[in-house]
Image (cartoon, rainbow, N blue to C red):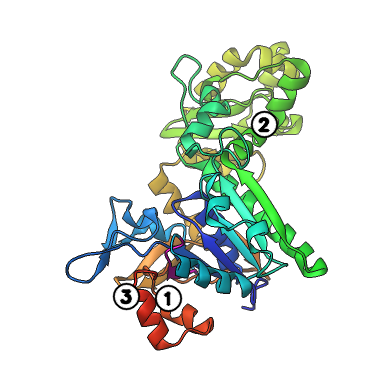
Amino acid sequence: MYLPLTGFRVVSVEQYGAGPYGTMFLAQLGADVIKIEPPGKAESDGKRRGGGDTARHVGPHFLGADESLYFQAFNLNKRSLTLDLGAAEGMAVFHKLAASADAVANNMRGDLPARFGITYDALKHVNPAIVCAHLSAYGRGNARSAWPGYDYLMQAEAGYCALTGDPDGEPQRMGLSMVDFMTGTIMSIGLLAALVDAQRTGKGRDVDTDLFSAALHQTSYPALWYMNEGDETQRTPRSAHPSATPSQMFRAADGWMFVMCQLPKFWDILLDRMGRADLAADPRFATNADRLANRDALTTLLDAEFSAQPMAHWQTLLAGHVPVAPVYTLGAALDSDWVETVQMRDQVDHPHRAGIDILANPIKLDGGRLPNRAAPLLGADSDAILGELGYDGDEVARLRAAGVV
């Protein structure tokens, strides 16, 4: 498969989740994503330990020293170059790399890109067309620039936790780090847009996003409801939609399922396929507004209906007619026949384990899933990348002995 970003080089000073998640999309779409990682400290036996992306050391499942399954989730298809950006020789290498690249990405704390010299202003003299994409917790150039921050904090401050969970329970975060994933994706969109412009004009720029801004932006229509009408969306029983009804979880005989009558036609189809014309004639449920006003009574009636049969029965009866889905555990979701049908699972071989199961990229090109290879070992590509930049073997050995790579 010829990939659309083939020939483009992205250098990324990244760690943990949000930034690496975004640049992984670029790598899977064909870009040469070079991951800059700290080389670690020399120990008495001459080996360097403790280096690399923090994600390499996140348990509980490891593949070897400096290797974890967590790291594989964010770094497929990339190359790894160990480089000390705090050393003058390290920055000299970085400048050579930036001169050969189309973009530089980072997810450093907001005050650090300027300090390390990885902004457009700092790099335009080596590459006027370079695009510098920045992802931080709270942005650059403001009172919170130096604040560390993580996904869960953004879910708390942007209102997610207050909107999630049972109305009578405590606030809850989402089960996954969705703010990280959204922000990484947004960063890559901004990077690609600036890259298109740089190809036309020969001039790069800075592109910024941050976890907080991305989290707040995703509050979407409830934000507009509040800002314009003072209508503050609240938690609902059964994770129900705030306005469409019935659109919530219901009990089947063998577990939970989600039914979504987002449009009036789905309510009519649901009653027809269930054989409950009597509910259509009930004035309490005549319109969506009526159903919303009488949601508790409707939930009781539909629970009685749905709980008489297992989920498989309702899936067969309603699928393709009314939006419906089983509420799976994570394991059941990953092992479902549909995941296999749409080829959302893939395998890659790693030096420490053959056949690691991974998730395929959700993007298709010409009807096919994107190809994958395992995330790199720490510094696995250092010699090759330095060779591409013109360093010979003796120079590489000297840089390594000095702890620069």
Q: In front here: 251 or 272? A: 251
> Quadrant of the rendered structure where residue 401 is?
bottom left
Measure the C-alpha gap from mark 1 to mark 2.
Answer: 54 Å
Task: Measure how far apart labels 1 and 3 are at the Cα level.
Answer: 14 Å
Residue topped by disc 1: 382
Label 2, residues with CA under 10 Å away: few <14, some 14-19, many ≥20: many
Counting from the top left corner in percent of width and height, residue 371 is at 54, 72
**Residue 80 within the magenta-colored segment of the rendering:** yes
Q: As shown in the figure, which amino acid type bears the numbered disc 2?
A: Cys
In this rendering, the answer to whether 281 lies above or below 23 is above
Task: Please indicate whether residue 18 sits to the left or right of residue 68 in the image.
Answer: right
Q: Against 403, is 284 above or below?
A: above
Q: Residue at horizontal 48%, vertical 32%? A: 153
Q: Could one spot residue 361 in this view of the protein? A: no
Which residue is at 43% across, 67% downward? 83
Relative to 282, 359 lies left or right = left
Residue behind mark 2: 261
Residue found at x 78% / y 69%: 202
Which quadrant of the structure image shows residue 393?
A: bottom left
Q: Which class describes the residues within 10 Å of circle 1: few (<14), some (14-19), or many (20+)?
A: many
